[in-house]
Amino acid sequence: MKSDSKKLASSGAVYFIFSILTQVINMLLIPLYTNNLSQMEYGKYELLNTIQQLLGLAITIGVYSGLKRFYYEVENKNALRNTALNFSFLWGSIIFGFIYFISPNISQYIFNGEQIAIEYIRVIVVSSLLTCLISIYVSFYEMEFKAFRAAVTQLTILIITFCLAFYFIAINQEGIMGALKSILIANLIVFIILFISNFKTYKIQIHMKYLKDMLYYGGGLLLGQVSAWVLNLIDRFFIKGLISYSAVGIYSISYKIGMLINPVFIAPFAQVFTSFKFKAYKEIDGKDKIKKMFHIYNIIGCFCVFGLSIFGKIGVNILATKEYLEAYKIIPLIAISYFIWGIGQFYSLGLHIANKMVSNSLIVVISAVVNIVLNIVLIPIMGINGAAVATIIAYMIANIFYYYFSEKYYSLGLGIFYPYKYFAVYVLLYGVYYYFISSLENLYVEFFWNVILCAAYIVLLIAFRFTNVQEIKVFLNTMLHKKK
């Protein structure tokens, strides 16, 4: 048990560190793109990224998830991996052939029939296939507790992508195709390295029992994954159709900054909470422990939202050109949507305990449908703000359903509106920022006042009795102890 705990702790630390490094490189890519692509081109590029993620779901059909699920239940683990690789290559080739022939139709529907868009689409299909194959290797490393190797693989792709993008975009001025070629070549290089390094254990084989199990499990997750794609990414298509490519570019910049709350706080918190909740709920004081975690989530999460909201303008100025400046106004909405999405891990606890995963998936599907309808209604009225608001409302509705159905199986005794009381301080101080500080042109002066606002935020949390000095001291001591 101690050995397993050490492995988990070590893996968690590695993933967290590399997650930060990954975000740093992703942030470095933004000015490279925004300074060398027009706003319209950047909007098109982000749409292509969105399509690539959907193609990734179509090609993988959850195979790598199935590999993780059955890794410890099969005798021949290499046969499991080889089955996943060979099937994915065959299935991906079929998808490529299909997309190759219908790419003119996709271009007509999404990119108004632009001839070059046909080539874009064909390139991203190949990139999606390579990404799928790499994901299988990475999943295998993760299950072997080779966290460093898994994390380095992902980071290497990004580093190569950045270097190639600098050459193709900044030096060769190849525009969107240069960006897509960078991703394709980076994935190809890493795949070749992985294939050669694992060649001794590779065989051309498909174990039908293993394949059936992986497809059954992974396919069951597919509906939820597609619905999650709809919730997070389909708004780009509505923005393009109802506004413009340039609006997609602005929205994407705000999204990249606003979503930083996920890798910095929500994802690491979820990794800890996932193992904690399934142990704690069985204990006598389990509910109190989970409530305490919920309190911590709300305190830190709201503070992260506030920080991104007031420092977002500075971030946009650093990462993008002046034509993207309006993106800072949408960052708070994006950060809030991620915060509300994270709340779902608490409200859906009862469904997970009772293994009601069909109900869980149906809630995601319903939320996705609501999101589509709200995008159609709100974007013409509110512009790109409408897309962000639609996502927030969809997540809130999902949490209402989670709360209602989960309470039957495990009641935490928390009201559905419990988390939103923590936003009282946020609303007050963000109002001060928006009306008195956001108009400042000197970023250094704005940075100074933002730091003052952060300090005021903590003081007001104590004044409103959302937390206390002792709790803050305990938290800081815990963080310092972990660093040591």
Image: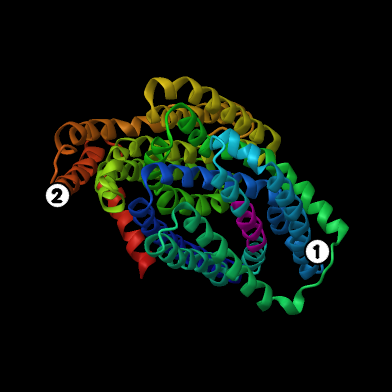
Residue range in magenta is 124-134
The residue under label 1 is: 74
* Residue lying farthest to the right in this orientation: 208
- The secondary structure that most of the magenta stretch takes on is helix
Question: Would you say residue 326 sits in the magenta stretch?
Answer: no
Q: Is residue 324 left or right of residue 59?
A: left
> Which quarter shows the C terminus?
bottom left
**Disc 2 from disc 1: Cα separation:** 58 Å
Q: Amino acid at mark 1?
A: Val
Residue 283 visible at all: no
- Mark 2 is surrounded, within 10 Å at the Cα level, by few (under 14), some (14 to 19) or many (20 or more) other residues, namely few
User: What is the secondary structure assignment of the residue under circle 2?
Assistant: helix
Q: Position of residue 90 (x, y in %)?
A: 78, 57
Residue 458 visible at all: yes
Q: Amino acid at mark 2?
A: Phe
Pick whichever, 73 or 474, lies toward us.
Answer: 73
Q: Which mark is residue 448?
A: 2
> Which quarter shows the N terminus?
bottom right
